[in-house]
Amino acid sequence: MADASLSQIFLATVLANNFVLAMFLGLCPFIGVSGRLNTALPMGAATTFVMLVASLCAYGLNYLVTAFGLEFLRLISYIVVIASAVQLVEMVLKKYSPTLFRALGIYLPLITTNCAILGVALFQTAREYSFIQALVFAIGAGVGFTLALVLMAGLRERLNLAIVPNVVQGAALSLMLAGLLSLAFMGFAGLGMGG
Amino acid sequence: MKQGIPFHLKPRSDESLFTPHPNGKRMFSFFHRHTFARGVHPDAHKSTAGSPIRRMPFASRMILPLAQHIGKPAVPLVRAGEEVVRGQPIAKADGFLSVPIHAPADGVIEAIELKASARGPWVESIVLRVYEASTQQVGWSQPCDIDNASPRDIIQAIQDSGMVGLGGATFPSHAKLTVPAEHKIHTLIVNGCECEPYLTCDHRLMLEYPADLMIGTRLAMRAIGAERAIIGVEDNKLDAVEAIRRCLPADGRITVQVVPTKYPQGAEKMLIKSLLGVEVPPGKLPMHVGVVVNNVGTLAQLGQLLPAGVGLTERVVTVTGPGINKPGDYWVPIGTPMRTVLEWAGVRDVDAREIILGGPMMGQAVASLDVPVTKGVSGILVFDKLHVEAERKIWPCIKCGECVKVCPMGLNPSMLGMLAARREYEAMGAAYHLGDCFECGCCTYVCPSHIPLVQQFRVAKGILRSKSA
Amino acid sequence: MTPRIELRTSPHVVQGGSVEQIMLHVVLALLPIAAFSVWQYGLSALASLVTVTLACIGSERLFNRLAGKPGTLTDWSATITGLLLALSLPPAFPLWMGAVAGFVAIALGKALFGGIGYNVMNPALVGRAFVQAAFPVAITTWIPAFAPQRFSEFAPTTFTAPLMQPPDISAWAKQALDGFTGATPLASWKFDNVLTTPTDFLTGAVTASAGETSAILILLSGGYLAARGFLDWRIPAAILGSAALAALLFQWLDPARYPDPLFVLLSGGLMLGAVFMASDMATSPVTPKGVWIYGALIGVITVMIRYFGGLTEGVMYAILIGNALTPLIDQVTQPKLFGQTRGKRA
Amino acid sequence: MTALTQPAPPPATSSLAMIRTLGVVATVCGVLLVLTYQNTLEAIEANKRIALQRAVFKVIPGAATMQAYYVSPTGVVEANGAPPPGGLKFFAARDAAGQLKAVAAEAGAMGYADMVRVLYAYDPDRQVINGFGVVAHRETPGIGDKIITDRGFLDNFRALDARLNDAGTALVNAIKGVKHGARQHAWEIDAISGATVTSRAVAKGINDSAGKLLPLLRPHIEKLKEAP
Amino acid sequence: MIPGRQQPTNLEEFLEGLWKQNPVFVMVLGLCPALAVTVSAVNALAMGAATTFVLLGSALLVSLLRNFIPREVRIATYIVIIATFVTIVDYLIAAISLTVYEALGPFIQLIVVNCMILGRAEAHSSKNPPLRALTNALGMGLGFSLGLLALGSVREIFGSGSLFGIALFGADFQPWVVMLLPPGGFFVLGAWLLLFNWWRARTPAALKAAEVQSHG
């Protein structure tokens, strides 16, 4: 895996191994925030951004943790540092770019304890990605998450106008839709295997 | 003399059916005839176009609602028991946006009371018992020297004539021809499209009274200060075009132009787009692009009434439909009850199912035969059992997109319909431009799911109006 | 004279045309294709067609009853789903799996969302994608076309006992038709760089799903539907056009590696999918501009999956992705409001 | 929990209290962690070793011991810690008598869904690959996972030709996957019908790995045979 | 803890998570691990056990320290505590069985972001004495395990024709591979929720109770 090309990593992460639809990561925000298109897109953007931050943090931390032989602190340090970093970014944004803060800020705290974020950190460590690979992976994960979120939001907005049977309302409907999307995304399996 | 007309609105040749595009896209002009986008092509059913307008006799009792126009109802000038002569004003305008009403026949006022109206609710109406001896002679007039009158005089004379938009809008004509100072009108468009199926009253008027139409057109041009007038006629009425062309004045300020037959070609904004290639922005009026549109029927009638100084007491009505024995265009005195009209024209069988005032696309079904013919009634259609389809099953929207393909206003009726079904009225108004729908009916016409879209939109508009009020 | 008057709202005339009519015509248009498929593959294909269609109709009835809705069988949509589904399955697909596919198509593809008009993806494709994921071996087990004894015996897989694995039929298939390799034209191209000739495609002498091969019939039926206005011609045009363009581009880049556009158009389920599946009204955009985007995306994704994906065929997934994108496409391609200047949309 | 009983916000805690708390919690957690880590470390290492050994022994039947090495252009070293630059990992398996049975190495290639990681055994005497096992895969159950069980496929790895050219720089014949039933040469891998993608991934992985590893390994074979 | 309401008994405390407020079926929490690892009943149970362990450990520690932790840093403290127990369980599983460890993969470590655990620490353990917190956590953990088991069993039965590795239908059974794949996970959980919706729609009283609970 460590020798995979960047485009391969990106394509596979966005489509074939989509974080939400193939890896079951980030399901809570996926189910929770996919009701409307106009929130789905900023949420996706904010998540992508946090993933990038998390990926950077995790890369540095992993380096430190491995160098000092403190593997057992990896998880704790990841989660604490990522959460703090996001908090920091939030503060900086609030101070220097209020517009961007208004657009993304409200989503940031929601995102911090999202398994997709930690997932990016853990997977890039497990797959021993290089620095650049890790960044591409994080962006791919974010784009994939956004894609799934936006598709889902579109479908759910449309179903708001449908007469869906009562027993299918709520989480059940969202999961079934996610299942259908996941089924459709299976078509991308193996995409980019030839490089 | 033509410096007031913007370059891109330069008059087109009235010679060709295939007018070249003003932007010079000549290549496609053969394929792309000048018209608005989308729309539908319903069957014309204009069988009455071939026979001359006939005159309908007076009914024994006439009903004249005080509100036959948009605006404040007229104020009665007569009391019960008073005798009136044909043409005499029996109600006066109440303010600027209002018009007087004239007695359609000699007779005696029976009462001023609530009577059934076409829209449903009972409205204040003057009931006139017609003397059997009443003649076509107009017993009252206030002649007007049209050649020397100022625009203001003309507008006053038009208001006094009680004229409203005869195409069905019933907007007082003088108000329409009163242009606020900030707008410079360069073109008067005379709407001779009559795009509704079945209706032929305008067609016959153009054929039979082209000279009156010219007089009316010139009066209107003077009133609004337009440099030119374009009479737009659909290409299924070429005989009318020919009749008008023979009467066109030599100065070339009035032209006639043929537009493709397509519904709703006769809608103001659509016709402006077809003739001039400009689109009136949403929420704006034709005068914002320097245009005023008037119906041919209105102008032809004006051309008759104004020089003589008489009021509007009769109009041409197309009485037709599969349920009518003697279909045709009739001069019908205003106030004639529907029952009388139908008796005269003959209803084919007792199983007439639907009686529609106006055209089949936008007209209104009436519940009572006691409803009178008012100024805005251009047609009376009677559909029999065969032609009124049995209750059609309504399916959910299958998103075929036909409605989107035909909506002349560029709306998304499919989405609007689904929103309406979920009562999301705010979204309809805010995000999907419900306010721009003028209920032409194209969407419902094509909908394979038989969703009553226009009706849903009407309801939604009403709710939005009452909310914002 | 007292006529009985009915009150209706305008417009008082309508074009005719109804959902039932559209659906019925689609069924009629599918029948020649189904007939060709039976002629090609014999009894097994016939059994599959009947079973899958009945499964769809039965499921529709069941769900309508559960939902307490009046029957909607008269709208023919379940029949269309059944026929399309059967035509997209291998001709000797075990009947019990076909029934599962039919049930899933109606249940997950349609009933879940409230029935006709509300489905978000083409039900037939949902059923197909489900069984493709569930029974990957059976759905890639093919039988030869025009085997001599096709009208006298069923393929051994057809009557597999429910829930059980179908038997291996490679020996049977080899004996049924000499030289039968069991690979579809796309698989032959992808893995062995062997191109099937256009003649084989046109005569139907290829290994394929039941209804994929009759390109001419599909185009004729589609043309009929389009001419009658029951099908938006833009969708197949956009899909086939964009797929051909993409194929042309790749062939220009590397002629040795990528096949010609004609092969791309004729092979696999592209024709059937473009004409009959992608054009499903409920799951395709409503705006004319959106329809072009939708079709172009499906064409390109199909070629991408075929060329670079793990699967040999991608039409089905491309259409499902297109379906999923439809609400978004609709959103961004709302028609321009009359009189509004471009770029200024509220 | 409910708005009704929302207490007034308590007075702000001093920074000292916060730091004290975090310190205490961190200490408690740290102690717990270190304890766990130390107590499980051996078991985990043992588990991993056993798992690896089991995998290697499965690929090289008859092996009794195994040792991991890194081979690089500079030589062969025992695999402890980080690999030398350009180093590749391989395992040398010996039988009970201490004779080198074969070497094993891991290969990987992108399969249908994800990386397919396999272990293969190389017999330096006969210059063939004669053992094969799957380490990890995410291929479709029922299709791709046939590479673990399919008899015909496993038969490919009885004596898969992996000869090096005379200069010892590359394989004479690239190992490649061919369509099911089309195997003609000893260096070809007969794909599983219906699982062509996965089969080819295996072939590609082994070819890439062997193509890199074997030329590096060749000069040191004799030494490996000697060293216990 | 609505005023005037009786302090729930220990049994109620235990049953709350197990049934009334089941994290999987009622609250729809912790979906990521619930879907990712439940391809077999064994995996489901292992994941359930691991989560229960973390729940218990963090509940105990949080409850013990509840009067000691300042409000401002409580979330950070909880996260550290949870992460500690997750790391512990990660090592324990690896020490016990590498096979299970590899089957669960990174999802063991992802327990740390299971919102259910943080939610329990915040809403319950920090306000109750250790025994009560443990009882509640045990109920939640078992409820979560039950949910995972329900998912895992269905997926294993359809996807492999077996339950806990024991073949149910004989060798010729045709596995429904889709059940082991991501779409199958979504569909099975969706179907379970559908079943629950249907059941609740039939018993309006139960529905009301659940609503009160989830808002409480």
Image (cartoon, helix red, strand yellow):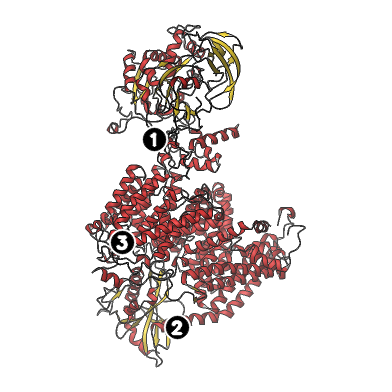
> What's the residue type where badge 2 is placed?
Gln
Which class describes the residues within 10 Å of circle 1: few (<14), some (14-19), or many (20+)?
some
Name the subunit of mark 2: D
Residue D166's quadrant in the figure? bottom left
Q: Residue at x 55, y 46 (%)?
A: A99
Q: Residue at x 43, y 12 (%)?
A: B304
Kind of element beneath mark 2 = helix
> What's the residue type where badge 3 is placed?
Ala
For disc 3, the marked residue is C208
Are both tags, 3 and 2, on one chain?
A: no
Look at the picture and state if A67 lies above or below B446: below
For disc 1, the marked residue is B38
- Residue closer to the observer: A81 or A161: A161
Which class describes the residues within 10 Å of circle 2: few (<14), some (14-19), or many (20+)?
some
Look at the picture and state if D146 lies above or below B275: below
> What's the residue type where badge 1 is placed?
Arg
Circle number at residue D53: 2
